Image (spheres, rainbow, N blue to C red):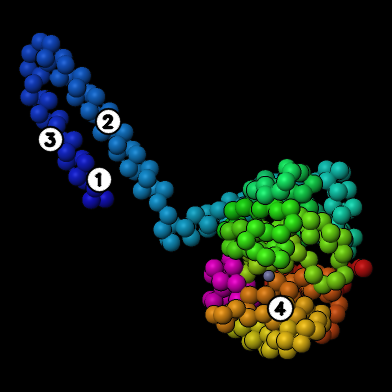
Amino acid sequence: MLSLLKKHAYIGIVINFAGGCSSNGVAGELGFLFIGGLVVVATLVFIIEKAKSKGRITPESDSRVNYERGKHLNNYLEQTKGERLTTEQCQTIEENLGLYHWVPEDLKKPWEERILVFLDSFHFTNMLDRNVTEEMRLLVAAEACLLIVNRPMSDYRHLQRIRLWENEIEGMENARGTATRHEVNLSWAYLKKTIGNARDGHNLTIHEFAHVIDFADDGVAQSIPVSRDSCDYEEWKVMVDEEHQRLMKSYESGKNYSIRAYGGYECIKGDKPELFSCATSAFFERGVRLKRECPKVYKALKKFYAIDPATWRK
Ligand SMILES: [Zn+2]
């Protein structure tokens, strides 16, 4: 703002000086042209400065932008309600996605609506040796949207891009997938190899997009996907602490149960980032077992995702 005021003051002085020379003949016309030129330049400088200040990213404007983006995604879903995938697209999902056959018929419509919005709204970055194909985009979208089949699109309001890699993710030894609030990285070879198996309790895409959802409310993946002011927050906190204790023992012994032992991983800051994602994979792929072994976890996920996979026909 200070630099903007200084520029305006400077321009004002030049205009006054030029105006003093415009009293006769050619000099007057030249002076007039000179003033006109300066006015154009001043206007341009003002417009550019204003645009710059509008585009400046501050934490406040960042959250406003994401709030607006969430609203836009939800509106888009509302506007395109009723649109369905093509027969070929349904066939591609059916042939590849192990979970497809378990999803109840009444969820197919909201699922397809979300897949279409997802495909139209999120950017795929090619990190492969070949091009990202429509099939690749469709399969990632299908799994990501199964998580939000009964939730708003705004769960992905912070998401900016999905990067598909051939095998390992560069700089992340042995990593098949990573996620931040803004980005998901997936190994296409691993995804393709495992996407058909819907019974092992692990699903790469579902796991990584569950992290995105966990991050969404507060920027932290601590396995509590609801905000601090939610009436469910305390219940989540207690449940995560309790369940994490059990998983820590599994993690240390390397023994899996319905939730993969990796869910017991704890990061240096004490957060428990993996429990929610591992439990989410188990929720979709081992619903009945999860409900039996960890009823509190199942109940919390059932309420959060607003679906009941333990009842899905398998
Ligand atoms: Zn993870």
Q: Is residue 198 above or below residue 272?
A: above
Under circle 1, the secondary element is: helix
Residue most extreme to the right: 314
The residue under label 2 is which amino acid type? Val
Give the residue pinned by disc 3: 13
* Mark 1–mark 4 distance (CA, rounded to whole Å): 53 Å
Q: Residue 263 has which mark?
A: 4
In this rendering, the label closer to the viewer, 4 or 2: 4
Which mark sits nearer the N-terminus, 1 or 4?
Answer: 1
Which mark sits nearer the N-terminus, 3 or 4?
Answer: 3
Q: Residue 4 has which mark?
A: 1
The residue under label 1 is which amino acid type? Leu
x, y percent for residue 30: 16, 16
CB at disc 3 and ligand 1 closer than 8 Å = no
CB at disc 1 and ligand 1 closer than 8 Å = no
Under circle 2, the secondary element is: helix
Which mark sits nearer the N-terminus, 4 or 2?
Answer: 2
Give the residue at x 75% y 80%: 261
Give the residue pinned by disc 2: 41
Kindly check if marks 1 and 2 are in contact, taking CB atoms under 8 A apart as contact: no
Judged by its main secondary structure, the magenta piece is loop
> Is 94 on the left or on the right of 238, as rendered?
right
Regarding ligand 1, which quadrant of the image does it lie in? bottom right
User: In the rendered structure, which segment of residues is drawn in magenta?
Assistant: 215-231
* Mark 3–mark 4 distance (CA, rounded to whole Å): 67 Å
> Is 160 on the left or on the right of 147, as rendered?
left
Under circle 4, the secondary element is: helix
The residue under label 4 is which amino acid type? Gly
